[in-house]
Image: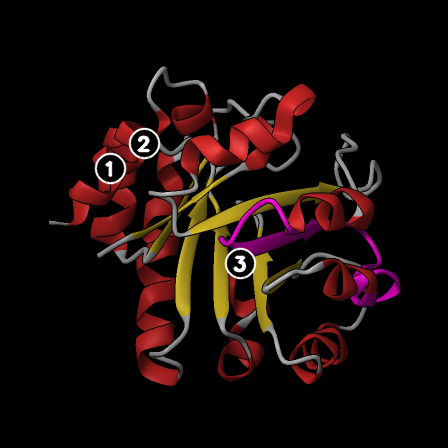
Amino acid sequence: MIKISPSLLSADFSCLTDEIKRIEHTADMLHLDVMDGHFVNNITFGPVVVSAIRNKSKLLFDVHLMITNPSQIILEFIKAGADIITIHAECQDELLPCIQMIKDAGIKAGISINPPTPLDLVVPLIREIDLLLIMSVNPGWSGQGFIPEILPKIREAKRLLNMDNPAAELEVDGGINAITGKQAIEAGATILVAGSFVFNSPDPDKAIGDLKRLSS
């Protein structure tokens, strides 16, 4: 069954503990979008917030670093309680040493690519990662619409993983709802990141359940 990783970026930051409780029993993991104001034009939160909510949830912490130089802060997020750390293929640091730093700490490592970025950039790293994250919106802000032109890239990413690293997860992030979620699953996604669709719903548990049933 498809896994759902609600994005905390769409939650009410004035009551994060309560927001996490709303999805605790149905979500598979919690997606934490970390933005530095340089890699994207938005600033969210850092390892202090991740550490503060770590003991509030038993969910896997799916930490997505949308930052220019992840090598400078990876260890802090590991200490804060990340279970998966995903860095961007477009960042300024060398990718393989960052992946190795993450894996050496005993947690899972992922690579993310933005909509304009060709998959060729991550092909040399396919066998080294635990997760490939395809952005289906341009990163930076929640509530954007799914870019349908990304679907062929998702299908090609699935083909590459099946060929060289079938155990790796294929995660899709951006504009996910009942319609686009179905499209992403059919293209090969194994994890859906959903922010507004879940946290803006009057019943987040039902919203997560609706997404999970798309794979049945």
Residues at circles 3 and 2 in contact by the CB criterion of under 8 Å? no
Between residue 70 and residue 162, name the one nearer to us. Answer: 70
Tell me the element at label 2: helix
Please tell me whether mark 3 or mark 1 is closer to you in this view: 1
Tag shown at residue 205: 2
Classify 130 as above or below 36: below
Which of pointers 3 and 1 lies earlier in the amino acid sequence?
A: 3
Q: Quadrant of the N terminus?
A: bottom left
Residues at circles 3 and 1 in contact by the CB criterion of under 8 Å? no
Amino acid carrying mark 1 in the image: Gly
Between residue 23 and residue 4, name the one nearer to us. Answer: 23
- Residue marked by disc 3: 118
Amino acid carrying mark 2 in the image: Asp
Residue located 49% across and 84% down the image? 127
Between residue 28 and residue 161, name the one nearer to us. Answer: 28
Residues at circles 2 and 1 in contact by the CB criterion of under 8 Å? yes
Q: Quadrant of residue 138?
A: top right
- Residue marked by disc 1: 209
Tell me the element at label 1: helix
Which of pointers 3 and 2 lies earlier in the amino acid sequence?
A: 3
Amino acid carrying mark 3 in the image: Pro
64 is within the stretch colored magenta? yes
**Residue 141 in the image, given as x and y percentages of width and height:** 62, 27
Range covered by the magenta-colored residues: 55-75
**Residue 216 in the image, given as x and y percentages of width and height:** 11, 49
Please tell me whether mark 3 or mark 2 is closer to you in this view: 2
Tell me the element at label 3: loop
Give neighbour class at mark 3: few <14, some 14-19, many 20+ (Cα, 10 Å). few
